[in-house]
């Protein structure tokens, strides 16, 4: 069974002429927009991915190449993966679980 994982990726180009990286991030998001096997949520500090492990690895590999294609001399990619095998895992489900725990903690 191909269960989904939830992952966080950050692709950081080094050796660029400008300190801003939004053009690189936008190009990485373009990669994700072309895929129907990985869902994503852009955050201020990274991108959350949801899909099978194989699909996420493939998407991250493609994203990692983007800064090189745009002239970066060095790229640091950080990937965190939440791979839960005892139940289905989704971005939405993880957030709902936290919110439910908060409600219980507050007694509501």
Image (cartoon, helix red, strand yellow):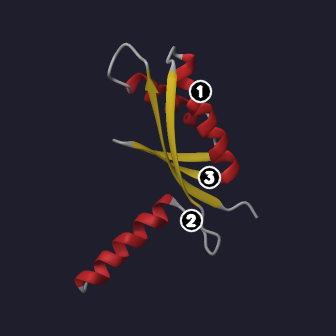
**In the image, what residue occupies the spot 35% across and 78% down?**
101
Give the numbered dot on residue 51: 3
Instruction: Return the x and y of residue 15 as percentages of the image width and height.
Output: 43, 18
**Counting residues from the N terminus, which is met first, the one under dot 1 or under dot 2?**
1
**As drawn, 74 above or below 10:** above
Q: Earlier in the sequence, mark 2 or mark 3?
A: 3
Q: Quadrant of the N terminus?
A: bottom right
Residue reaching furthest to the right:
1
Determine the CA span between mark 1 and mark 2.
27 Å
Residue occupied by mark 1 = 65
- Dot 1: few (<14), some (14–19), or many (≥20) neighbours within 10 Å? some
Tell whether 29 sits left or right of 98: right
Residue under the image location 30 percent in, 75 percent down: 102
Count of picture labels:
3
Q: Position of residue 108 (x, y in %)?
A: 25, 84
Which element is circle 2 on? loop
Q: Nearer the viewer, residue 9 or 72?
A: 72
Q: Is residue 15 above or below residue 35?
A: above
Q: Position of residue 6 (x, y in %)?
A: 54, 56
The outermost residue toward the bottom is: 107
Instruction: Please tell me whether mark 1 or mark 2 is closer to you in this view.
Output: 1
Is residue 37 visible to the viewer in this orientation of the structure?
no
Cβ–Cβ under 8 Å for marks 2 and 3: no
Of residues 82 and 38, which is closer to you in this image? 82
Asked whether the viewer can see residue 106, the reply is yes
The residue that label 2 is drawn on is 89
Cα–Cα gap, marks 2 and 3: 9 Å
In-front residue for pair 103/75: 75
Q: Nearer the viewer, mark 1 or mark 3?
A: 1
């Amino acid at each position: 069974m191909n269960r989904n994982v939830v992952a966080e990726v950050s692709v950081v180009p080094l050796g660029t002429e400008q300190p801003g990286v939004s053009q690189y991030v936008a190009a990485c998001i373009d990669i994700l927009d072309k895929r129907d096997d990985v869902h994503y949520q852009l955050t201020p500090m990274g991108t959350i991915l949801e899909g099978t492990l194989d699909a996420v690895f493939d998407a991250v590999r493609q994203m990692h190449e983007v800064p090189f294609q745009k002239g970066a001399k060095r790229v640091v990619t950080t990937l965190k993966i939440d791979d839960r095998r005892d139940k289905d895992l989704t971005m939405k489900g993880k957030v709902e679980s936290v919110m439910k725990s908060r409600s219980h903690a507050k007694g509501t």
